[in-house]
Image (spheres, helix red, strand yellow):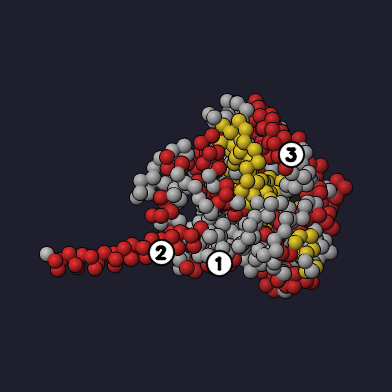
Amino acid sequence: MRGRNDGGQSKRPIVLLCVMVVCLCLLFLYFSGSNGQAGSAALEYGTKFSRSLGWGSYGDDDGLEESIFGTGDADDVKLKSFPVCDDRHSELIPCLDRNLIYQMRMKLDLNLMEHYERHCPPPERRLNCLIPPPHGYKVPIKWPKSRDIVWKANIPHTHLAHEKSDQNWMIDAGEKIKFPGGGTHFHHGADKYIANIANMLNFKDNNINNEGMLRTVLDVGCGVASFGGYLLSSNVIAMSLAPNDVHQNQIQFALERGIPAYLGVLGTKRLPYPSRSFELAHCSRCRIDWLQRDGILLLELDRLLRPGGYFAYSSPEAYAQDEEDRRIWKEMSSLVERMCWKIAEKKNQTVIWVKPLNNDCYRSRTPGTNPPLCKRGNDPDSVWGVPMEACITPYPEQMHREGGSGLAPWPARLTTPPPRLADLHVTADTFEKDTEMWQQRVDKYWSLLRPKIKPDAIRNIMDMKANFGSFAAALKEKDVWVMNVVQHDGPSTLKIIYDRGLMGSIHDWCEAFSTYPRTYDLLHAWTVFSDLDKRGCSAEDLLLEMDRILRPTGFIIVRDKGSVIEFIKKYLNALHWEAVSVVEAESSPESEENEMIFIIRKKLWQPGGLPDPK
């Protein structure tokens, strides 16, 4: 008996010591994870620990199937902080991350540009850290000055200034970067080049807007988007498109300048825009092989062009006389002729083709002519993750009979009910009431924002659930542009947005958006969180994504039910956000029950330091 008692007493200190060591280790792990220093390793989503906080997708093995809004699951979440991503992630685009492609050993066809298409990380590889701004980051220069000059510290990359020094893309000017307005094909300025295109098309006064009939443009391979930037003074808006390729940061520069832009590529998937969205497509030395795969890339442009739309092509094939260029020109001319395009004009190293107004040419082609017409079941407005097809998209019968899109000239186009409302079984009265309702809502928003913002503080805006685009339409008197986002699995209202002369993209908010960090001044989220919760996606993922794409000192307007607002409030400190205003939303038939308006501002902070109170 005595021996056993002595043994128990000798083991007790060892057990206590082990318990203390374990506790200290756990405390160390907790505080090192919440310290928020720039060099800290980012935690990953999908672990049992992160799911216990509501991170990752719901409905997984742990059984989180119910909404966390307004339940006990969320009430106990009081995050001290999110860790800060390593500096190397300061320009992270989660679904366009080449490092992820290498790490996951994806087998992609480089010739088809698949490595520049969207490949989102699986839940277990998503980072739950805050994207830090680069060291020395400053509040961006305001529009319209930003068209011509930006802070170098915000995008500390000058390789394009040296690589394209003979083409006037951009100039390294000390602590700033200047944009003289040049491009690969328009060294002497985009303004002169644009006027030349208008002159080739015999537009009145050499104005590219053609008395309001040319409003929306797709600029493929846009560089730093000077072409799109200089179109804006003519009341023409361009979606400037380029991949995250060897000319890295070109779209980041475009957005920093306050010019509409999107990261995308003509690869294997349809671009995230509905059919018949643009009056003009433009390619200036964009280095695209238009003849590959039976002309599938040119046929994608054809899908996107309106009846009578133009394709302006400035490239050596259009004028050079060497054997290879002549071969390409001959084959391309044959292709567009079979597509029923005609040359509108060809001079000054540029050719402009025009698309037919109706289906007559398509129907008169010799049977068996390639490319074929798309099959009847092919929905030209279904685009999210949909492969391109090497076929011609014919016009609907009504559009064929009318011989055009039937759109009003700009700016009347913004508020005139477009013909394609009938595709959605929406009446003109419903459209007009929606426009009026959002005008009242936006007026309310600005009354809440006005004490906190200067007149020129906001330029780049994203409406995360745009519906018919009436939020953007209500901002017509302000010097801003709006990226109107439409959910990929909802009604195809994005075509209505383009028919109003506005810009936008299809997207799935369960994934990251195709843009760089710190590219938008204001995000508008109308019931986005409630919709996401119904689909079983993570609200925390979305909060971190919104933080990624929002500029420091930028604003968020959340319009959602009260339980969503209370949920978001719990994350303000962790995200370095501050509440500006919380009010009850005005009641309307379209409002959710207990709908609230929550206005938030993102603080300017640096890794390892406290948020800047400015």
Q: Which of 536 and 267 is in front in this view?
A: 536
Residue underneath mark 2: 25
The answer to whether residue 32 shows anywhere in this view is yes
Badge 1 element: loop
Q: First in sequence: mark 3 or mark 1?
A: 1
Please say if the residues under marks 2 and 3 sit with CB atoms less than 8 Å apart: no
C-alpha span from label 3 to label 1: 38 Å
Name the quarter where the N terminus is drawn: bottom left
The nearer-to-camera label among 3 and 1 is 1
Instruction: Say which mark, if any, is on residue 450.
Output: 3
Q: How far apart are marks 2 and 1 (CA)?
A: 20 Å
Of callouts 2 and 3, the N-terminal one: 2
Q: Callout 1: few (<14), some (14-19), or many (20+) C-alpha neighbours within 10 Å?
A: some
The residue under label 1 is: 39
Residue 99 at what x, y percent from top left? 53, 67
Q: Which residue is drawn at 58% across and 67% down?
A: 88
